Amino acid sequence: MEGLTLSDAEQKYYSDLFSYCDIESTKKVVVNGRVLELFRAAQLPNDVVLQIMELCGATRLGYFGRSQFYIALKLVAVAQSGFPLRVESINTVKDLPLPRFVASKNEQESRHAASYSSDSENQGSYSGVIPPPPGRGQVKKGSVSHDTVQPRTSADAQEPASPVVSPQQSPPTSPHTWRKHSRHPSGGNSERPLAGPGPFWSPFGEAQSGSSAGDAVWSGHSPPPPQENWVSFADTPPTSTLLTMHPASVQDQTTVRTVASATTAIEIRRQSSSYDDPWKITDEQRQYYVNQFKTIQPDLNGFIPGSAAKEFFTKSKLPILELSHIWELSDFDKDGALTLDEFCAAFHLVVARKNGYDLPEKLPESLMPKLIDLEDSADVGDQPGEVGYSGSPAEAPPSKSPSMPSLNQTWPELNQSSEQWETFSERSSSSQTLTQFDSNIAPADPDTAIVHPVPIRMTPSKIHMQEMELKRTGSGKEAVADHTNPTSPLLVKPSDLLEENKINSSVKFASGNTVDGYSSSDSFTSDPEQIGSNVTRQRSHSGTSPDNTAPPPPPPRPQPSHSRSSSLDMNRTFTVTTGQQQAGVVAHPPAVPPRPQPSQAPGPAVHRPVDADGLITHTSTSPQQIPEQPNFADFSQFEVFAASNVNDEQDDEAEKHPEVLPAEKASDPASSLRVAKTDSKTEEKTAASAPANVSKGTTPLAPPPKPVRRRLKSEDELRPEVDEHTQKTGVLAAVLASQPSIPRSVGKDKKAIQASIRRNKETNTVLARLNSELQQQLKDVLEERISLEVQLEQLRPFSHL
Amino acid sequence: MAVCIAVIAKENYPLYIRSTPTENELKFHYMVHTSLDVVDEKISAMGKALVDQRELYLGLLYPTEDYKLCRYGYVTNSKVKFVMVVDSSNTALRDNEIRSMFRKLHNSYTDVMCNPFYNPGDRIQSRAFDNMVTSMMIQVC
């Protein structure tokens, strides 16, 4: 058997239980004795009990030794907590609550358990479990006949808590006086309708004399006030004093008991149970109240509005302050109206107050408007409770059904903790609460880009792609300068892209600027080639970023230049591209086309040769990159779109260039930027591209720049428009193209989306930088232009002359 | 922890004012009285739009040289004002906590109003309200 480690509380509890079961004081416990009862009280199925016994070794030994008993108790706790029963679970399950036992015989145990339990949970459960012997006992105190008390006290005496029982018997004398008083005003005045029940009450009081329960006393006591016209308390003061003593003594007894048991929960419960008796509404009283309710509100399920109730209770001539307090107590749901239960409770409190009882701070349990499931049991409890408290102890927790012992416990707890009621009312009350909660919560939400769904186009379509490219080309123009990396990732994954070279990934390229795994590309594969190319590019990009999820392409940027691009370069682009090669290339949405062109026009032709050289260089290096064609393919398409003319060259070139460019970018994005800015940049770029080609995938920057550059160069070749801007736009286009233009399949994976968002944001920043740089370049170029024009003008007069 | 809680009626007379008795209560009364002006100012400034759009919680009324005591304001739609003086020498109460305290106050106040035996304009003598206020004034201690 495993060694058992018990906490202090457990140790005490178990030892107590052991001593309880160890009747013979022999350190041995007979299996068939108390232990079985105990286990049965644990409310575990029989097979579980057998299993426990087997596990602890009792079946083997034939008896429960102390260790076996302890182990069994621990296993009971384990089983009650829902854990599987295993020998090792004894010590492995942490924070196991003490085993709970429910049965009248185990009152002592439960009480002891309650006293030993340290955490409130156990307290709650224990106290809920404990049948209300104290309540019963206290009920007894009101009873005239000791007969009824005796059985109960004897039952109580079974427990070692007998000393607690005895004080309960002290007040029995009072009922005698009460009863006398109850008969006293039987003459009663019939002035008021309230007095009508007067004579009814008194015989009732007499009838009740023989019965147990302070209810009898109470009922005997309550008639007098109504009989007395609500006004005269002449007869009642002496009884009221007694009655007031009664609850006081009840409380004392309660405190005595509570001292015995250290749990506050039990204490509360006992206090409330003590209150239950004096506060319990007898049948006749309830009937009376109901009749009164009917006079105001014929429908028993309806409400009495506050004003009507106010009038009614004002008749009792109680001070407004007290009536206000009674209202607070009785209006359970704080709705300003009284249901039948609430009305009865209020009426009862008024009666009590008139009799001199002090109003409680909290509504007593018996007066609480019962919940639906409790109502029946409460009613049941009322009647049998009054008559036969000697009934089974488990049957009648004073006010709550035995089926809801926990609720029984929680009511007083709830009652006392106004906090809970407040929260209850908070939730139920004004919508302000709700709105305020919302307003409080809403701002607290961190800005999680993750949360909001990025609009993703799930169905890739060429049109869409073209649109994306269009948009992107516009933006691509601006972002040309900075993208040196795109090709590098492409270079990284040549194998993936091999088959997709030809795919017109122009769109993708523009969109694929984001380095991340535009793994949405995966979805693209099934799509037309464009998509496929996009995919490939994305994969290549994903080389730079670890996760291959497909981020949604950045939202298409509205570009004022779109029109330009579309009007100017699109056509050219299309014609060029179609002329070129890209067999698989479908329509090339003009990615970043036109921008460079107008600016290119004034551009010095000097660039061209440089670019040509660069191109040559590139072409020379192209063979190396042929295997990486997939990348190229993508880039080329991007370039076509971006530069709008770039792909004029052969496929190989187109392929090489993107490779080159990305490589360049990868190697030296910054340098590419700088290069773009100056005339010599192209040279640098080409130079950079050459080595960059070698170093594939060195830097995971936006691939597009390279293709763009290539495009620019090809453009230069095609048209005498070598310009930094062209290069830049090409770069931009490449960058943009590399970005996943279409957020198709992305929607699948939120993480992919988020990743893509991040990448897109990075790309955005890059592009923004590019933009600014390009703007600067544009300015410079314009200045150049102006100077040239001025020169031209200067020269022209001469010509004219 | 709230050291003083006051409920001011629409006509700017107190319906309920309570402070922890440790300090001079008059000082708290004075503070609440001075805050009323600020509250009115805030109401009028914000109330140009529809009243409904005005937020009930006013927040810190005005910065004081005494960094320990902060006054927070809250106005209901019926121009009943709640002013709370908070001792911030303890853990600084966050705005949300102040809001929740005001919310509780407001709820308790509506419960008081629901009582047909309560005449609007009377001093609040509800025990439940007292208990709630007590709990609030002690809670953070």
Image (spheres, coloured by chain):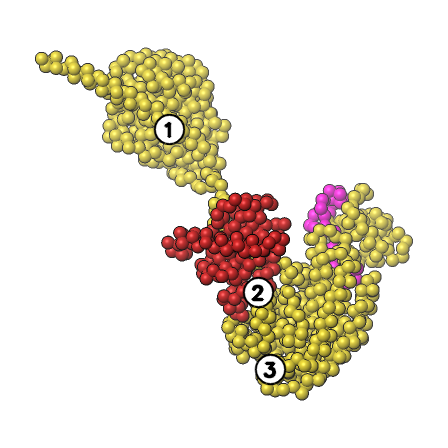
Q: Is residue A21 left or right of residue B72?
A: right
Q: Earlier in the sequence, mark 3 or mark 1?
A: 3
Residue A718 is inside the magenta segment: no
Q: Chain of mark 3?
A: A
Q: Could you say which is closer to the camera, residue A420 or residue A659?
A: A420
- Which residue was labeled with disc 1? A768
Q: Tell me where residue A532 appears, x and y as whole percent.
A: 39, 30
- Which residue was labeled with disc 3? A194
**Amino acid type, residue under disc 3 in the picture:** Leu
Q: Is residue A8 left or right of residue A570?
A: right
Which structural element holds mark 3? helix
Please tell me whether residue A437 is drawn above or below residue A741 in the rendered image: below
**Amino acid type, residue under disc 2 in the picture:** Gln
Which chain has been coloured red in this picture?
B
Q: Are marks 1 and 2 on the same chain?
A: no
Label 3 and label 2: CA atoms lie apart by 30 Å
Residue at horizontal 33 percent and vertical 14 percent from the top: A680
Q: Could you say which is closer to the camera, residue A543 or residue A629?
A: A543
- Which residue was labeled with disc 2? B125
**The magenta stretch spans which residues?**
A79-108
Q: Tell me where residue A246 appears, x and y as whole percent.
A: 73, 71
Residue at horizontal 20 percent and vertical 18 percent from the top: A789
Q: Chain of mark 2?
A: B
Which mark lies nearer to you, 3 or 2?
Answer: 2
Which chain has been coloured yellow in this picture?
A
Q: On the image, which quarter does residue A503 sit in?
A: top left
- The answer to whether the residue labelled 3 contacts the one labelled 2, judged by CB atoms less than 8 Å apart, is no
Magenta stretch: dominant SS?
Answer: loop
Please tell me whether residue A23 is drawn above or below residue A232 in the rendered image: above
Q: Is residue A228 visible?
A: yes
Label 3 and label 1: CA atoms lie apart by 87 Å
Please tell me whether residue B8 is drawn above or below residue B68 in the rendered image: below
